[in-house]
Structure formats: C-alpha cells, structure tokens
Image (cartoon, grey):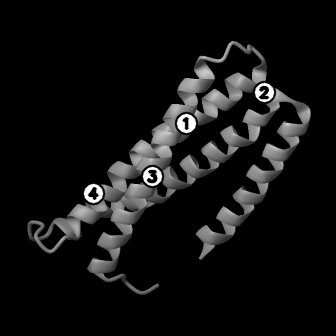
Amino acid sequence: MQPLNAEFLGEMGRQVAVVSAFLGGFAATFLGILLQSPNSRRHVGWAAGAAAVASASFILAVMCWGLLAVSVHPGAPPGLAKTTLLLQFRILRFVSFAVGIYSILLSLGLSGWIRSRQLGIVTSVAAFVSAVIVLLLLRL
C-alpha cells in the first residue's frame, strides 16, 4: 500500500467531513421526526435508534476527518501530521463513517414499515441494495 499525498488526504478529509455533516444532520432530523411520531409500533423505536446511532457516528466522523484535513494542511504545525494521534484515528475515521452509513440505511429501510407492509418492502429493498453498493464502493 503506497502512502498517500498530504494534499490528497486533506481534500479527502474535507470531502468526507462535509458528507458526514450533511448525513448527520439528516439523521438527527429524521430522529426528531420519529420521536414525535404518535405511532408506538416497534418499527418506530428501531428506526429511531438506528437514526440516533447514525447521527452520533456521523458527528464522530466529522471530527475525525476534520482532524485529518487540519493536520495535513501545509500551515499546520511541524510534526502534527506524523503524530500517533493520526494513526490511532485512522480506523476510527473509517468505522465511524461506515457505521453511520449503514445505520442511516437501516433507519430508512425500517421507516417504510411504520406506514404499511408494501412501503416497508420497498424501503427495505432499497436500503439493502444501497448497502450492497456501499459495501462494493468502500472496498475500492
């Protein structure tokens, strides 16, 4: 595995942080809507729980990817990019983003079941197909 260019790492960190912030905001909004639902079916609780996990994971991803972008910036203090902190956060960056993606897909897949069986099937299939595609994309 070849080492990545600092400029590339910084741009990747910024891009993933922006996507994580957007998706985290969506997950938090979705959580708020689900918590206000008068429906007490078990699907609502599971969808709300998955949205909460997604929101928390994306918040963590924003922080980790943002730290990466800042640390590899040319104006960063010398040696910051070489700290063990970056190595320790390497796995956390990926895991928090992946958990956020799969949690929000789970929440979206469960949300259809709140309304009807037919909509539940459609949202579950859409979430499953998206999860497979995300898995293939993350393997790249």
What residue is rendered at 37% in x and 83% in y?
3
Circle 4 residue: 67
Asked if residue 107 lies left or right of residue 55, the reply is right
Circle 1 residue: 53
Going from N to C along the chain, the mark reached first, 3 or 4, is 3
Amino acid of disc 3: Ser
Circle 3 residue: 20
- Residue 37 appears at what percent x and percent y? 65, 18
Asked if residue 72 lies left or right of residue 75, the reply is right
Quadrant housing the C terminus: bottom right
Circle 2 residue: 114
Going from N to C along the chain, the mark reached first, 2 or 1, is 1
81 lies above or below 7: above
Could you say whether the residue bearing mark 4 is in a helix, strand or loop?
helix
Which of the 4 quarters of the picture holds residue 137? bottom right
Going from N to C along the chain, the mark reached first, 3 or 1, is 3
What residue is rendered at 84% in x and 37% in y?
120
Amino acid of disc 4: Leu
Q: Is 17 or 139 nearer to us in this picture?
A: 17
Residue located farthest toward the bottom when viewing the structure as drawn: 2
- Report whether residue 52 is seen: no
* Alpha carbons under labels 2 and 1: distance apart: 19 Å
Tell which tag, 3 or 4, sits nearer the viewer: 3
38 lies above or below 102: above
